[in-house]
Amino acid sequence: MIACITIIAKENNPVLLRVYADGVDETKFQYISYCSIDLLEEREQNLPTPTPDMKPEERDRVLALRRSGMFLGLLYPVEDYKVFGYVMSTGVRLLLIVDESDRQDESVVVALFK
């Protein structure tokens, strides 16, 4: 079950935080979202970037990946939740905080982000 969705602007500030979990304080998800910003930046820095010395087909693959948006996968588990990240081609980031008791595999989250 989706517990919370957060949209983070390019400037690293959350612009929308929507909580779907019943009986949970919103400040808990605010804290999780702010902690996730550092992890998003770290994962983005580790993604491949096109360089002039790359083969053309490899460079095209990297550019296509960056243009289409990037699923960063599980950022980290926290208490009863799992935090997944996605970076859009515009630089806007999405966080999906899922209840850990929901045993869905990562392919369901990937399908949601696409």
Image (cartoon, rainbow, N blue to C red):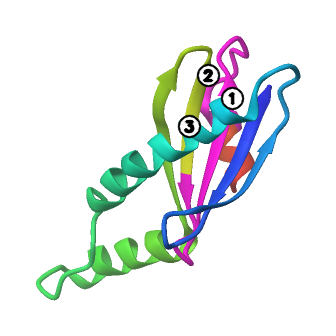
Among numbered discs 3 and 2, the one appearing first in the sequence = 3
- Residue tagged 3: 31
Q: Which mark is residue 81?
A: 2
Q: Which residues are magenta?
A: 86-108
Horizontal side of 16 relative to 21 (left or right) equals: left
* Position in image of residue 106 (x %, y %): 60, 32
- Between disc 1 and disc 2, whose residue precedes? 2
x%, y% of residue 75? Answer: 45, 37
Q: Which residue is rendered at x = 62% and y = 14% of the image?
A: 80
Q: Quadrant of residue 96?
A: top right
Label 3 vs label 2, nearer the camera:
3
Q: Nearer the viewer, residue 75 or 61?
A: 75
Marks 3 and 2: CB-CB under 8 Å? Answer: no
Q: Is residue 69 magenta?
A: no
Q: Please determine whether, in this image, residue 62 is positioned above or below residue 30.
A: below
**Magenta span has 89?**
yes
Q: CA distance from mark 3 to mark 2?
A: 13 Å
What's under tag 3, amino acid-wise?
A: Tyr
Q: Secondary structure at mark 1?
A: strand
Residue at 26% in and 85% down: 56
Tell me: 58 left or right of 100: left
Total numbered circles: 3
Secondary element type, mark 3: helix
**Amino acid type assigned to the residue bearing label 2 in the image:** Tyr
Give the Cα separation between the discs numbered 3 and 1.
15 Å
Residue 29 on image: x %, y %: 65, 35
Label 1, on which residue?
Answer: 98
The part of the image, by quadrant, that contains residue 16 is bottom right
Image position, residue 71 (x, y; %): 53, 52
Q: Is 50 left, or right, of 15 in this rendering?
A: left
Quadrant of the image containing the C terminus:
bottom right
Q: Are marks 1 and 2 in contact (CB under 8 Å)?
A: yes
